[in-house]
Image: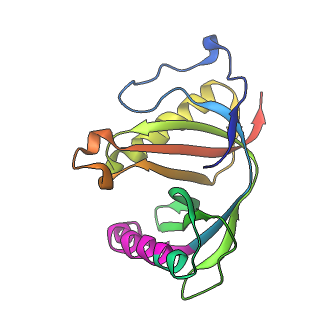
Amino acid sequence: MHDASPIQSPPLAKRAPMNPRSIDVPSIQETTELRTAQIRLTIAKDEIRSAMGPAISEVFATVAKQGLAPQGGWFTHHHKIDEHGWDFDVCVAVDRPVSAEGRVVAGTWPAMRVLRAVYTGPYEGLGDAWGEFDAWAKSAGIETQRDLWERYLVGPESGPDATKYRTELSRPVAVTK
């Protein structure tokens, strides 16, 4: 798991109202570096459903083939999201460095200070959850970097009820006012 110790959250008076069905109250946390096996994807937004599954499968197959142990669930690191498409890594933390094979390469989730919250609901709601997350950060005077990290804590493997999916949302903190 990614070690993250909670840090003092902004005072209650600065917090934006939260929708209890969407994300929990964000908090600032310090993370430790994770070694990863990952695939970089640059795709049009409408390709996400056809590209994500094969990339996840390829990462986990390579990790297993090399005898590495996954350290928690899979996650994505989005470098850029705009109207033209997405540029992101599909990743899993591993116990030892992965050797490059096919599209899979070694990487890291660096130690950093992040603003983090957990979204509960179907993947289709992640866009709105990020909007809520970013609005909360702005109202709290927390400036974050543009890239973002999504860790999929509970997903389709747990059952068919998408309202129970849980996704950890993290953005590196740039400045706290």
* Type of secondary structure dominating the magenta stretch: helix
The foreground one among 18 and 59 is 59
Looking at the image, the residue that sits furthest to the left is 160
Judge whether 122 appears above or below 46 on screen.
above
Query: Left or right: 91 with respect to 114?
Result: left
The residue depicted at 51 percent of the width and 82 percent of the height is: 65
Q: Which residues are magenta?
A: 39-60
Query: Left or right: 113 with respect to 93?
Result: right
Q: In the image, is residue 89 part of the stretch drawn in magenta? A: no
The residue depicted at 33 percent of the width and 40 percent of the height is: 121
Query: Left or right: 140 with respect to 21?
Result: right
Image quadrant assignment for residue 34: bottom right
Image quadrant assignment for residue 20: top left
Image quadrant assignment for residue 99: bottom right
Q: In the image, is residue 46 part of the stretch drawn in magenta? A: yes
The residue depicted at 50 percent of the width and 74 percent of the height is: 59
Judge whether 20 appears above or below 88 on screen.
above
Judge whether 40 appears above or below 102 on screen.
above
Judge whether 105 appears above or below 112 on screen.
below
Query: Left or right: 174 with respect to 106?
Result: right
Picture coordinates of residue 173 (x, y %)?
72, 41
